[in-house]
Amino acid sequence: MRRRAWLVGLCLYALGIAADLACHLIEDLRSGDQVIEFSELAVAFSAALFWPVDIVAMALLANR
């Protein structure tokens, strides 16, 4: 039972990574020259790995 709970948690975390990565890449496409560069991909990937922190940071920066 414990292994199944860990697997479900890991799958949900991976789903969050995919959604956050997609949001960052879509945002990069809509702004600027509408081309995703390698540096933007690296930033989007690193932000997606820590998506819970990224969500909090985006919420705090939106209030500025």
Image: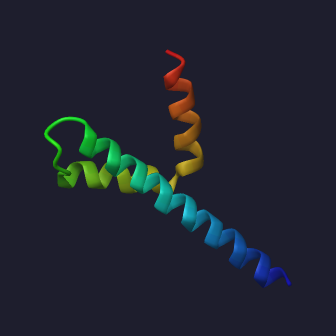
Q: Nearer the viewer, residue 35 or 45?
A: 35
Looking at the image, which residue is at 64% across and 71% down? Answer: 10
What residue is at 64 percent from the left and 66 percent from the top?
A: 12
Image: 50 above or below 28: below
Judging depth in this view, the residue of 34 and 42 nearest the camera is: 34
Residue 4 % position (x, y) = 77, 82
Is 44 on the left-hand or right-hand side of 4?
left
Is the N terminus in the top left, top right, bottom left or bottom right quadrant?
bottom right
Q: Position of residue 2 (x, y in %)?
A: 83, 80
- How many numbered discs? 0
Please state the horizontal and vertical placement of residue 55, each as a whole percent of the image: 56, 40
Whether residue 59 sits left or right of residue 32 in the image: it is right
- Name the residue located 61 percent from the left edge and 63 percent from the top edge: 13
Residue extending farthest front: 30
Question: Is 62 situated left or right of 38 in this image?
Answer: right
The residue at the far top in this view is 64
From the viewer's perspective, is 20 left or right of 35? right
